[in-house]
Image: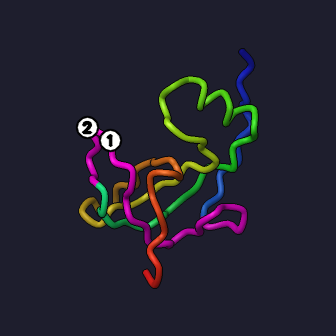
Amino acid sequence: MKRCTRRKIIVGGDEDEWHKETRVEKTNSEPGDTHRDGAMGTIVGTLGPAPPALRAEILAGGKVKRDVVFMYWVEWDDLPGLPVAIVDYRIKPVKGG
């Protein structure tokens, strides 16, 4: 199986879905997650977008439940200074945040 090794890191660029400093809320929590639905944080970085072949490979691997286009680094309000990676479908932007 061929792996894609070219990934673009965007920190607050215009290519990501949600930009740096976007306030987000945790959604789609799973057992064992440190943060539960409703936890608040701020995006501090982005990896993506993942090319279609890599997205299919990630989904087929069974470790995620939905298609992943972006990986975000979020600094959660209760853990300032410690960015945590999270896939796009497990956060949502907060309106007016």
Q: In the image shown, does 62 or 12 lie closer to the viewer?
A: 62
Q: Amino acid at mark 1?
A: Glu
Q: Secondary structure beneath disc 2? A: loop
- Asked whether the residues under the numbered discs 1 and 2 touch, taking CB atoms below 8 Å apart as contact, a structural biologist would say yes
Label drawn at residue 32? 2
- For label 1, the residue is 30
Q: What is the quadrant of the N terminus in the image? A: top right
Q: Is residue 54 left or right of residue 11?
A: right
Residue drawn 58% across the image and 55% down it: 46
Q: Which residues are magenta?
A: 12-36
Whether 23 is among the magenta residues is yes
Classify 10 Å Cα crowding around label 2: few (below 14), some (14-19), many (20 and above): few
Residue projecting furthest to the bottom: 96
Residue 52 sits above or below residue 83 on the image: above
Tag shown at residue 97: none
Relative image position of residue 31 (x, y in whole percent): 27, 38
Q: Is residue 67 above or below residue 78?
A: above
Where does residue 28 sit, x and y in percent of width and height? 39, 50
Three-letter code for the amino acid on which mark 2 is drawn: Gly
Q: Residue at x 70, y 33 (%)?
A: 54
- The answer to whether residue 18 is magenta is yes
Magenta portion: prevailing SS class: loop
Query: Spatial distance from mark 1 to mark 2, Cα to Cα?
Result: 6 Å
Asked if residue 36 lies left or right of residue 12, the reply is: left
Residue toward you, 50 or 29: 29
Q: State the residue in front, 28 or 33.
A: 28
* Colour scheme of the picture: rainbow
Which residue: 54% across, 40% down?
66
Residue 64, percent across and down? Answer: 49, 34
Q: Position of residue 85 (x, y in %)?
A: 45, 47
Mark 1 surroundings within 10 Å by alpha-carbon count, few (fewer than 14), some (14 through 19), many (20 or more) = few
Name the secondary structure under disc 1: loop
